[in-house]
Amino acid sequence: MPFINIKLLEGTLTDEEKEEVIRRVSEVVAEVRARPLPMEMVLPHTTCIIEEVPLGQWGIGGKVVPKSALSKKTE
């Protein structure tokens, strides 16, 4: 059955937003996978994980983006 893995920067979403993302993404994937059957046949077996990547542990263009770069944009 479907396994969904979502990676986000740490602190990007609140717990409530994560719950909504998990619910909505799982529903869409289950609906597509189950066609032409009802999604309710696949949804109980659909796994969705959100992984938070710590700030400073990701990069763009081969360069690590420092924590300070993000804090300036979010202020």
Image: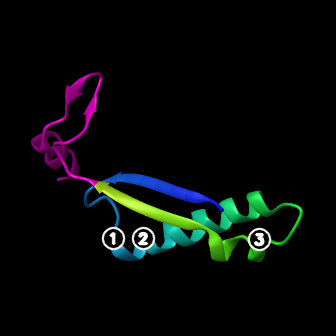
| Amino acid of disc 3 | Met
Q: Going 61% across and 68% down the picture, which residue do you hit?
A: 46
| Amino acid of disc 2 | Glu
Q: Going 10% across and 43% down the picture, which residue do you hit?
A: 68
Picture quadrant where residue 23 is located:
bottom right
**Tag nearer the camera, 3 or 2:** 3
Which labelled disc corresponds to residue 14?
Answer: 1
Compare residues 56 and 30 and report the one nearer the observer.
Answer: 30
**Location of residue 57 in the rendering, given as x and y in whole percent from the top left corner:** 20, 42
Residue 22 vertical placement versus 71 (above, below): below
Q: Which residue is mark 3?
A: 39
Which labelled disc corresponds to residue 17?
Answer: 2
**Location of residue 47 in the rendering, given as x and y in whole percent from the top left corner:** 55, 67
Picture quadrant where residue 61 is located:
top left
| Amino acid of disc 1 | Thr
Q: Of callouts 1 and 3, which one flags the residue occurring earlier in the amino acid sequence?
A: 1
The residue stretch that appears in magenta: 53-75
Q: Are marks 1 and 3 in contact (CB under 8 Å)?
A: no
**Tag nearer the camera, 1 or 3:** 3
Q: Of callouts 3 and 2, which one flags the residue occurring earlier in the amino acid sequence?
A: 2
